[in-house]
Amino acid sequence: MTTLTPGAPGTCPFTIDRPVMRHRWERLTFLHWPFEAADVQRLLPDGLEVETYDGAAWVGLVPFYMRVATPGGQRVPWASNFCETNVRTYVRDHAGRSGIWFFSLDASRLGAVVTARATPYRLPYFWSSMRLRERGNQITYLSRRVWPAISRLRIGIGAPIAPADVTALEHFLTARFMLFSVTGGRPVSARACHQPWPLYRAQAQVLEDHLLTAAGLPAPEGEPLVHYSPGVDVTIGRPEP
């Protein structure tokens, strides 16, 4: 069950009264590239339309560390804590609701991959060997998919961004509170509620990635727009038609 709660930009527009899961997304980096809308739209299922900003579709590569718990806070050792990397874009459904479409989600826990693929969310998880390391103001992510595709990133973390200075584009890319998937040929959605991201400027110092092209996208052009966040706590709702 969800309740609408109006708020400032970047704030979750609802509360989830009966969550299915509680997550902690931490040590997270957003890398985003603009794409031609047609190149992204052709990979989407019926019922979803790519959402653009200034005429461009945006695709994100998002590595981070995930902690998963039940609504009561219990954790399962074989599926609760792991590295993850998402390839995602931004879409609207026929009702005009904005959300995320995941092209892929790589995780380092096989139990989490099996569980995520079996649940009604039916998210496209892949099992990968992954590593996350921190040193000073640098953070390094390595992902090597069991079905080969590699992503190797080193990020330099810069200054924090004051909430009042977060731009409309930065809100567009990060303030997302719904995901879409397809189950049995039918679209489903789920809500994910969290506080506004604490964002930092960042730069990709090393960037080698094949996850975007493995999803069927063209190779991205130019340098990505990069942001880092220490993380947020997230409440996940049940799948909805």
Image (cartoon, helix red, strand yellow):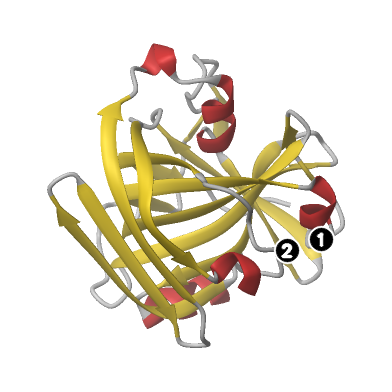
175 lies left or right of 38: left
- Residue indicated by mark 2: 182
The 10 Å Cα crowd at callout 2, few under 14, some 14 to 19, many 20 or more, is some
- Quadrant for the N terminus, please: top right
Q: Quadrant of residue 162?
A: top left
Left or right of 104 in this view: 38: right
Which mark's residue is nearer the viewer, 1 or 2? 1
Q: Which residue is mark 1?
A: 45
Give residue 113's position: percent from left, percent from top: 46, 76
Mark 1 → mark 2, Cα distance in angstroms: 8 Å
Task: Examine the rendered structure and indicate whether residue 17 appears above or below residue 161.
Answer: below
Farthest-out residue, left: 136
Q: Is residue 191 left or right of residue 19?
A: right
Q: Nearer the viewer, residue 84 or 189?
A: 84
Identified at 66% across, 50% down, the residue is: 189
Give x and y (percent) for residue 168. 57, 21
Q: Which numbered disc flags the more N-terminal residue, 1 or 2?
A: 1
Q: Secondary structure at mark 1?
A: loop
Which of the two residues, 164 or 179, is positioned nearer the viewer here? 164
Residue at point 39% right, 64% down?
84
Tell me, yes or no, if residue 204 can be seen here.
yes
Label 1, residues with CA under 10 Å away: few <14, some 14-19, many ≥20: some
